[in-house]
Amino acid sequence: MYFLLFFTLACLSTCYCRTENDEKAESMCGLLRQSLTSTSVSVEIDKKGFHRDVVTTVEFSPDGPSDLQALVVHKWPRGIYVDPYQLASLSEHTDWQVLLDSAIDLEVPAHKTVGLVAFVFPALHGRIPRLLKVTVPVHGRYHEPSFDGKKFTSIDLDPPELLLRTGKCQLSYLDPHTIVDAPCTADNSSICQWARIQHKQGQASFQLPVGDGLLVIPVCSATLLVTLVCCVALAKTVWKHQLFTH
Amino acid sequence: NRVLFTASVAIRLALVAYGDYQDRTMAVKYTDIDYHVFTDAARFITKGESPYNRSTYRYTPLIAWLLTPNIYLNPMFGKLLFIICDVLSGLLMYRILCLRGLGSQAACRMCSLWLLNPLPIGVSSRGNAESILAALVLGTLLCMEGRRLVWAAMLYGLSVHMKIYPITYALPICLTLRTPDTGAGEEKERQTWRRLLGFIRSFLNQELLLFAGVAAGVFCGLTSFFYHMYGWEFLHETYLYHLTRRDIRHNFSPYFYMLYLTADSSWSLGLGLAAFLPQLILLLLVSWAFHLDLALCCFLHTAIFVSFNKVCTSQYFLWYLCLLPLVIPRLSLSPKQGMGLLALWFAGQGVWLGPAYFLEFEGYNTFLLIWLAGLLFLVINCFILIQIIAHYKPEQTAQRLKSD
């Protein structure tokens, strides 16, 4: 009988503990859920020409969990690229790190390559700022010449995805359509589950100059003509002043 | 003499030190990106891997090997090596000028055109490896002037291994070393095929075969050694990439816009060949016309090669600038005319750099302007070369070929 009483008490206490842990986890996840709805991310483009800065601004909600981790996922079109060596030397002065999904060819023109996915891991240091800005330098690729008289081509950057996670929340408590798999850290050693926020602000875009394909014939003719004239002039001079043995 | 060389070393060392300071403190770096490429490749070698793991490393593994002390000793080692080669080039220039009959004072003044010239000073202190090649080419010329053929051949083989363009010097060197025509003209003119046979046979003499054998041996030896170590990647990155390179991004070449617009069309191959023909014809002509004066011949070769090339960046200018001081003493141009030509050359570059800046850093569509500036630069280069050729007064030493 005492054994039965003891057994019942033990079961009740475990249930109580588990409920308390569950409550704690639920409250953490509640904070996370709140963050997902009230955090927003936007992107804008700085500088001009072929070398630009993509500035990602994240506005965090003030009541998020303390050990929040963030990950910004950029899906960029093939018209731009990042220089991994530049990023490596930048990472010595900044507190964010970038992981790229594939090796980058720095010289290939746009139509001969594919877009890239960049995972930007800002370091939050256990303290969530109100506003976080991450500036990633990008470079434009040369594009195919245009055959419709347009002098510029447009590069459109979709707004990035902002992913959040916290160690204390099992993401199974959240809506399943907000859960994505992504690398846990910039060294890509493991994959974790992250929660995706809902607010995304509009596209950013910029223009890159392209060659005018309609001028192909005049350009080729004029180039070949000038080089021919120079070649003939030089050849004449060389022949006239050649050194003779006597 | 000693003052000149000491001063040139001091200036270069000071700039290397300043460059280190600027790299550490300012956002715009002094050191060229190529130096970081060399250092990264050297790091791979110290780990026992291939230097071609470093993307955009498109040089011989020898450079990465030479720079391994960057990792073991000090990152500055490479720059010090390039500076030493730079000053060594000045010394070799001095020796060649003296051998060609110039007095010591005048030779010093000519060398100062290289030793105190901001372009090679800047290039070496920023960490580009062009000075190694300048030293090798000048070494080859010095040995040819002094008739030390084995050394010349070894240096020549090494320089071709490091960069492909010295291969163009093969023809003037062969023409210099072949047995000259020894008269008896009428007999030869009777039959063309016999004349042709005699011409070909004149190439088969002991000196030329010795030179060709040693140079080819050095080149093939190095190539097969590195091929054995690094495989196909070595061949592709060091040689094939440069031969088939179709960089359509803006550069000084007059063909840049034409190649950009036709990059994916069916004309691309034909146009590439059409662009190659002026280079080839001019190089053959210059070899034949000036082979008696090897320094002038090599200078003209490289200047024409660079000006008519499908890709032309400012690093290439050093390839012929290191030979210019050898040519200047025999020019009958006045200093005023010389300065005028120099100003014209810089103006041509300036006219190109303006629209290029606006394209790359401000985003304006200045392609047409860049193209026209490239054509103008070609015209200016040809004009300068024509002036140099027209005002060249060769020494009356054409007969000394076989007599010593």
Image: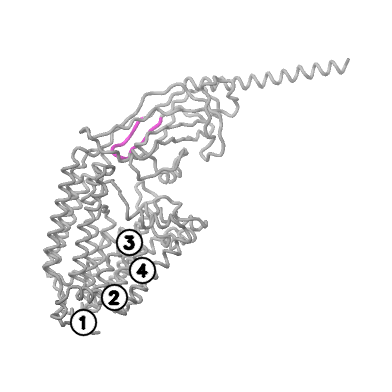
Residue that badge 3 annotates:
B164
Chain of the residue on which disc 4 is drawn:
B
> Which sits earlier in the primary sequence, circle 2 or circle 4?
2
Q: Earlier in the sequence, mark 3 or mark 2?
A: 2
- Quarter of the N terminus of chain B within the rendering: bottom left
Amino acid type assigned to the residue bearing label 3 in the image: Ile
Label 1: state its secondary structure.
helix
Label ID, residue A162: none
- Percent from the top left, x then y, of residue B12? 33, 62
Q: Amino acid at mark 1?
A: Arg
Residue at image position (50%, 29%) is A128
- Region of the chain picked out in magenta, as a range: A44-56
The colour scheme of the drawn protein is one colour
Q: Which secondary structure is most common in the magenta stretch?
A: strand
Label for residue B157? 4
- Residue at the image position 33 percent from the left and 75 percent from the top: B211
Q: Which circle, 3 or 2, is nearer the viewer?
A: 3
Residue where numbered disc 1 is placed? B400
Same chain for labels 1 and 3? Say yes or no: yes
- Of the image marks 4 and 3, the number of the one nearer the N terminus: 4
Image quadrant in which you'd find residue B86: bottom left
Q: Are marks 3 and 2 on the same chain?
A: yes
- Residue under label 2, please give it: B144
Q: Residue drawn 30% across and 48% down?
A: B247
Choose the circle earlier in sequence order: 1 or 3: 3
Q: Closer to us: mark 2 or mark 4? A: 4
Separation of marks 3 and 2 at Cα, in angstroms: 20 Å
Looking at the rendered structure, the kind of residue marked 2 is Met
* As drawn, A174 above or below B401: above
In the rendering, at what x and y percent does residue A152 appear? 25, 34
Dot placed on the residue nearer the N-terminal end, 1 or 4? 4
